[in-house]
Amino acid sequence: MKIYPLNTGNFKLDGGAMFGVVPKSLWQRTNPADENNMCDWSMRCMLIEDGDRLMIIDNGMGDKQNDKFFSYYYLFGDASLEGGLNKLGFTADDVTDVFLTHLHFDHCGGGVKWNKDRTKYQATFKNATYWSNSQHWDWATLPNQREKASFLTENIIPMQEFGQLKFTDKEGFNYFDILMANGHTDAQMIPHIKYQDKTVVFMADLLPSVGHIPLPYVMGYDTRPLLTMDEKGKFLKEAADKEYILFLEHDAANECCTVQHTEKGVRVKDTFRFDDLFK
């Protein structure tokens, strides 16, 4: 097995929205904001090559929406899904499995794209199975008013229409262990991957960045923030005890980190690039 970090793009979000009730004077120490209060975030995915399987975990925002939509998110930099795959020696046609932690647009939007004439949608990964779970699928396709703007029909429904969608809870998915988390959104899946005698955890939105490690640092986007705190607290204690490698999807500065127990609770231990640890 070989794991590759794959950054599909960079964007900006309001720092207050990303840290909820925590004051800016505190969260800006780890996530500095610009003059408009916007902080930098990545859409870092994971590519897993194992024998004849090539799996991508999440796939970024994609490029289907109009200029007005993208203007809200201040995309910057040269990173892209297709470019990242090409740099690693792959194409989208090589991907056999697309694992989606959840169906918010910045995690699944890259899985569906326009055809050349921009007249209809097609699968970005035409040879792949797209994996969600039935509980989250129902949550996303009949969205509540709070999350409706994050669940975009054009990102989600085509996967089913293409005949490529399967559910981990119904199809006997056993490629890696999955932690279910319900604070950010219902039935978010957090992959735990055994790799070179370590456990690498793809953190998705349970822990967007190193700056979110202290328990009160919870996104304003979370549907159940108190549940997020409970889920995050239990996970971080386990991560410190078992020395997990935390792979950070949204942290623009840090690909990975480890955590440790301190007098103030679980805190960051080390930050590093994934390839520097697994050379």
Image: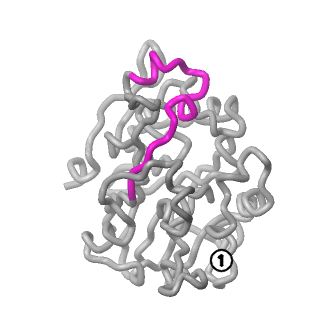
Instruction: Kindly state the secondary structure of the residue where label 1 is placed.
Output: helix
140, 48: nearer the viewer: 140
| Residue 155 horizontal side relative to residue 224, left or right | left
Q: Residues within 10 Å of mark 1 (few under 14, many from 20)?
A: some
235, 119: nearer the viewer: 119
Residue 223 vertical position relative to residue 16 in the rendered view, above or below: below
Residue 185 vertical position relative to residue 31 in the rendered view, above or below: below
Residue 241 in the image: x percent, y percent?
A: 44, 33
Label 1 sits on residue: 158
Residue 41 in the image: x percent, y percent?
A: 42, 44
Residue range corresponding to the magenta coloring = 9-28
- Which quadrant is home to the N terminus? bottom left
| Residue 90 horizontal side relative to residue 56, left or right | left
Residue at left offset 69%, top offset 29%: 226
Asked whether the viewer can see residue 223, the reply is yes
How are the colours assigned in the image?
A: one colour
Residue 27 within the segment the image draws in magenta: yes
Residue at left offset 54%, top offset 34%: 18
Residue 236 in the image: x percent, y percent?
A: 50, 33
- Which quadrant is home to the C terminus? bottom left
Quarter-of-image position of residue 100: bottom right
Residue 251 in the image: x percent, y percent?
A: 40, 42
| Residue 244 horizontal side relative to residue 232, left or right | left
Residue at left offset 46%, top offset 14%: 264
Residue at left offset 42%, top offset 23%: 261
In the rendered image, the residue lying farthest to the top is 263
Residue 215 within the segment the image draws in magenta: no
How many marks the image carries: the answer is 1
Asked whether the viewer can see residue 233, the reply is no
The kind of residue on which mark 1 rests is Pro
